[in-house]
Image (spheres, rainbow, N blue to C red):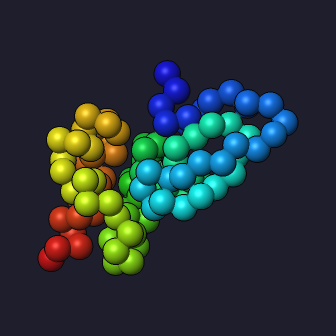
Amino acid sequence: MVHFGIGAHRTGKSMVYGKCVFCGEIFARDAKMQVCDKCEVILTWKSSMAYLAAVNRLSALIDAGRLDSKLRNENYCKANFGMLAAQVITDAIGSSEI
């Protein structure tokens, strides 16, 4: 299953531009995606080190004020990104509020 374009097949030799759903940056890829390289770890983490990298990425977005307000809703995150991403998003938000 291709989720947010991660692991999607190439669209051809041309580049496809997209806007990241987490940080809002415009990026170019050879496949249609909705997540940039820096934020991809938020959706794909499997190990504890990748989890920490995802929390750090989200913490940086929170500190910069660039995290979308709808991502603060845990049910929205579960429905749109899955349990792993929802877990890391809520943990990053919780640790930034302390």
Q: Position of residue 62 (x, y in %)?
A: 33, 71
In the depicted structure, whether residue 28 falls above or below residue 25? above
Q: Residue furthest right?
A: 13
Image position, residue 57 (x, y; %) = 43, 65
Would you say 67 lies left or right of 41 here?
Answer: left
- 39 displayed left or right of 32: left
Residue 24: horizontal and vertical position, in percent? Answer: 48, 60
Q: Is residue 74 left or right of residue 77?
A: left
Count of numbered circles in the view:
0
Residue at image point 17% right, 74% down: 97
Q: Nearer the viewer, residue 91 or 76?
A: 76
- Pick the quarter of the image with the C terminus: bottom left
In this view of the protein, can residue 14 be seen by the observer?
A: yes
Vertical order, 3 against 61 (above or below): above
Q: Is residue 53 visible?
A: no
The image shows residue 59, relative to residue 3, as above or below, that is below
Reply above or below: 8 against 17: above
| Camera-side residue of 93 and 48 | 93
Residue 18 vs residue 1: left or right? right
Which residue is at 18% across, 51% downward?
A: 73
* Residue at 21% across, 56% down: 72
Rendering quarter of residue 33: top right
Asked whether 50 or 73 is in front, the reply is: 73
Q: Residue at x 54, y 61 (%)?
A: 25
**Residue 67 x/y as whole percent:** 34, 64
Quarter-of-image position of residue 7: top right
Q: Furthest-top residue in view?
A: 1
